[in-house]
Image: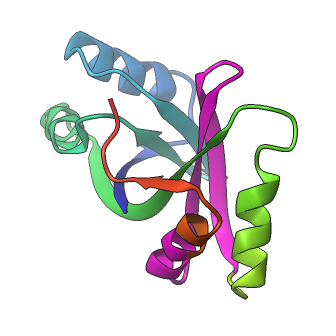
Amino acid sequence: MYKEVRIFVENKPGKLSRVAETLGNAGIDLLALEIADEGQFGVVKILTADPERARQVLEVAGMTVAFNQVAVIEIEDKPGGLVKLAKAIENAGLNVSDAYGCILERGKRAIFVVKGENLAAIESSAVKAGLKPLDKLE
């Protein structure tokens, strides 16, 4: 399992650039990002190699930050690369409540970030399907 950093921001122009600038100025690289619209507020979800440091930097800048546990599964970056994981989760009778992905190496490796009720079971089903859950990102 991995710590996804969640930043709660007002749904107004300039809020994303403030998050990006704060992290960029601290030398923190974003590996994946998703934005969820929650009406008046939004949630910026990020994966970074150093979630603890990202949280500290964002909090010092006055932002509201929390961690969320997610499963990060490495998959092949090719057409149909997600099928193996999706079938493994389905066959285990598990549900996905939130997910997003990003490419690590074009044409080779990608990650799929999954949130569900039972992250350990999601990771276990991935392993049984020959996939690799990640607990560290670079």
**Residue at 24% from the left image edge and 11% from the top image edge:** 25
Q: Quadrant of the C terminus?
A: top left
Instruction: Give the percent coordinates (x, y) of residue 89.
Output: 70, 74
In this rendering, position of residue 95 left or right of residue 113? right
In this rendering, position of residue 5 left or right of residue 73? left
**Residue at 31% from the left image edge and 14% from the top image edge:** 24
Instruction: Give the percent coordinates (x, y) of residue 6.
Output: 40, 50
Q: Is residue 45 above or below residue 90?
A: above
Is residue 38 visible in the rendered image? The answer is: no
**Residue at 48% from the left image edge and 45% from the top image edge:** 45
Residue positioned most to the right: 79
Principal secondary structure, stretch drawn in magenta = strand
Of residues 100 and 54, which is closer to you in this image? Answer: 100
Q: Quadrant of the N terminus?
A: bottom left
**Residue at 56% from the left image edge and 73% from the top image edge:** 122
- Residue 84, image quadrant: bottom right
Write down the region rendered in magenta. 95-124
In this rendering, position of residue 42 left or right of residue 107? left
Is residue 21 visible in the rendered image? The answer is: yes
Of residues 18 and 93, which is closer to you in this image? Answer: 93
Q: Is residue 104 magenta?
A: yes
